[in-house]
Amino acid sequence: MTKPPSGPAADALARIEAELGGALGPPPGPAELAALETACAGDPERLRRWLKRRLAGEPLAYILGWLEFRGLRFAVDSRAYITDPELTHLVDAVLNRVRTLPAAAGQGPLLAEVGVGCGSLALALKRALPAARIVGLDLHPGALALAASNASAHGLELRLVESDLFESWPADLPPPDLIYGDPPWGDAASLYAEDRPAAHYLAMPAASAFPIGGRTGVHSQILRAVAARGWASEIWLNGGILSPDELRAAAAAAPECEIVAAAPRLSLLRCRMAK
């Protein structure tokens, strides 16, 4: 049985309920309430405002203005997708693979992230692989601005490009050694957990929540774009809770394809489109 909230959060919730003249439904969980109380630093009016926003369905990270991922804090707002904690498995997979790549003469490996968002994945990778060169691609200039701010805050170098997939890939760079990303996948019925309902994702930039072109439409689009360029890059894409069969079908044209079980019910798609 869930313990009812107490302290400042309980007082604020009771006030909101009285203002609205009825029950509010289940309140935010204890961890969320604690985060809001801490961030409000004893300001009861701010706490009440922020609780109203949370009760209306606004994601917690947007209200706080930050998220934590792999021990780092990143500024985030409605310009960018909120990083799912499950993506730590994609970062681990990319780290493990990059460490086995042959080193280029005098240069670190060249990585490209499709949909860099606020930069959380790219910057976690850069911190662990200082020699790596990472290019973050995104449709949204606002997300790129957030990523640039986060890179500066952490003192990490990240090259950022506004691009539809690889259309604006820098002419001064060779093809990337490895491409990775968390493309939008599934639909409103395929979700990680009950604490993140469809409304959580629908509050984010439209192109980052659920894919156009079907449940794996963006995965297929990325693979076709790499094939069209004749790149021999290795590709690692998050598949979330989609089934291995669904991911294999999305990569049917790939001459090399593997489904990697990242954790129970979580899959990654590894492909190479050219030898």
Image (cartoon, grey):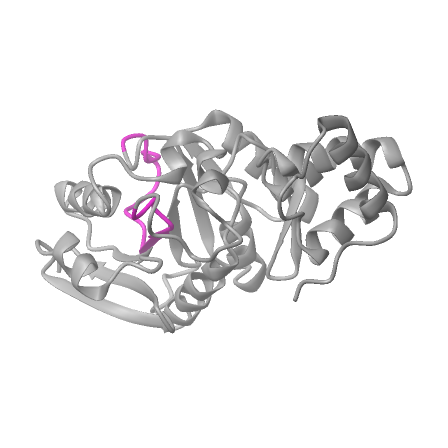
Q: Nearer the viewer, residue 204 or 97?
A: 204
> Relative to 167, does residue 222 appear above or below in the rendering?
below
Residue 147, position as x, y percentages in the image: 56, 38
At horizontal 32% and vertical 50% (from top left) the residue drawn is: 176
Q: Is residue 162 left or right of residue 185?
A: right
Q: Is residue 18 visible?
A: yes
Span highlighted in magenta in the image: 167-186
Q: How many numbered circles are shown?
A: 0
Q: Is residue 155 visible?
A: no
Q: Nearer the viewer, residue 211 or 139?
A: 211
> Relative to 134, does residue 208 appear above or below in the rendering?
above
Residue 190, position as x, y percentages in the image: 34, 52
Q: Does residue 168 show up magenta in the picture?
A: yes
Q: Farthest front residue?
A: 22
Residue 208, position as x, y percentages in the image: 40, 37
Residue 47, position as x, y percentages in the image: 81, 37
In the picture, residue 205 is in which quadrant?
A: top left
In the picture, residue 20 is in which quadrant?
A: top right
Q: Farthest right residue?
A: 42
Q: Quadrant of the C terminus?
A: bottom left
At horizontal 88% and vertical 43% (from top left) the residue drawn is: 41
Q: Quadrant of the N terminus?
A: bottom right
Q: Is residue 103 left or right of residue 258?
A: right
Main SS category, magenta section: loop
> Relative to 102, does residue 60 appear above or below in the rendering?
above
At horizontal 57% and vertical 46% (from top left) the residue drawn is: 157
At horizontal 54% and vertical 56% (from top left) the residue drawn is: 126
